[in-house]
Image (cartoon, rainbow, N blue to C red):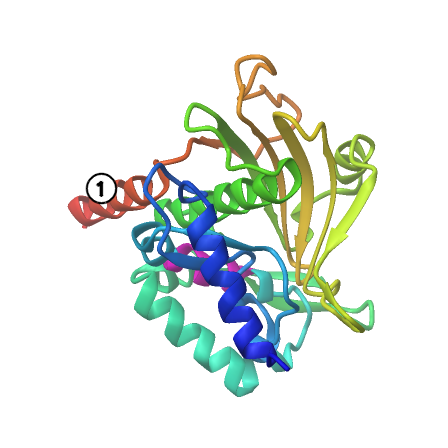
Amino acid sequence: MVGQAKRKKISHRLMLETEERCIYCAAPPDTIEHMPPLVLFLKRQRPKGLEFAACKECNNGTKGADAVAALFSRVSHADRDPYWENGDGVTLRHTVDRDAPGVRDEVFDEGKAATRWMKGDAGVLVPKTVVHADGPLVKAYLDVFSAKLGMALYREHVGKPLALEGGVQTIWYMNSGLSEKIALAHLSILPIDGSLKQGSFTARDQFAYRYNCDEKSIFAALVGLNSNFHIFLIASSTPEKFMLPLSMPEIATTTNFLRPSQLVEHLASKAAAVGRLR
């Protein structure tokens, strides 16, 4: 009888042999990408599925984006969050510092933090520290992660990688930034539920999405990560046909549009620009 680890190894080898290119660029694949990544899940316990062939440059070159997305999926507006008091939280902070240097300094800059009186769990006003994750590094990492997720889900539901001339438009929301009005507007065109499930092991509380897809050239979804970070995305191999990137006049948050082969370069250019400003 073939063991689970051996079956997984065989499955990954076949994936690398049969995929013509990386899901994120034109290069031949030589690694396996998990999207969403292991770092996003508690104790790295992730149901099987949504595994893709990727090249080493894209996989390793964008791991900082994975860590930053995992960080913000865990930043809660709750009064107390025990996650940061255990080993997982400490490990994640170290991972962000290693793979996305400068991000925590940018976000938790004392000059940007402010104290506001906000309702706590009991409904009573309490002082809370509010930080604004609007710096160039944070935006670059979260834009790239969102585009990665769009390309991965497109591959999963369309059955082939996003065309090199295609692209992904994304917009992300932190904590309660996704209003009920905007959420309902997104969900009204997204009828199908998606997540990860392996037998009785599910992870809907950590990763879930609603989507729509023509199974040919366009995929749209609203993704929730740990209930604190949401991404609306539209991926298409023929973006001009669907007039992408779309104008979203009622949405104040800046949207982003990235094509395959642009992810690593986008991060490198933003990091270099920030370095020149310091």
Residue pointed to by mark 1: 273
Q: Position of residue 128 (x, y in %)?
A: 61, 67
Q: Nearer the viewer, residue 17 or 157?
A: 17
Q: Left or right? Give the position of 255 relative to 159.
A: left
Q: Mark 1: give few (<14), some (14-19) or many (20+) Cα within 10 Å.
A: few
- Residue 153: tell me if it is visible: yes
Q: Position of residue 3 (x, y in %)?
A: 60, 81
Query: What span is colored magenta in the figure?
Result: 63-72
Q: Tell me which residue sits at (80%, 73%) in the image.
A: 200
Q: Tell me which residue sits at (30%, 60%) in the image.
A: 102
Quadrant where the N terminus is found in the figure: bottom right
Find out whether residue 68 is within the magenta segment: yes
Q: Position of residue 264 (x, y in %)?
A: 31, 45
Q: Is residue 69 above or below residue 9?
A: above
Quarter of the figure with residue 152: top right
Q: Is residue 147 above or below residue 98?
A: above
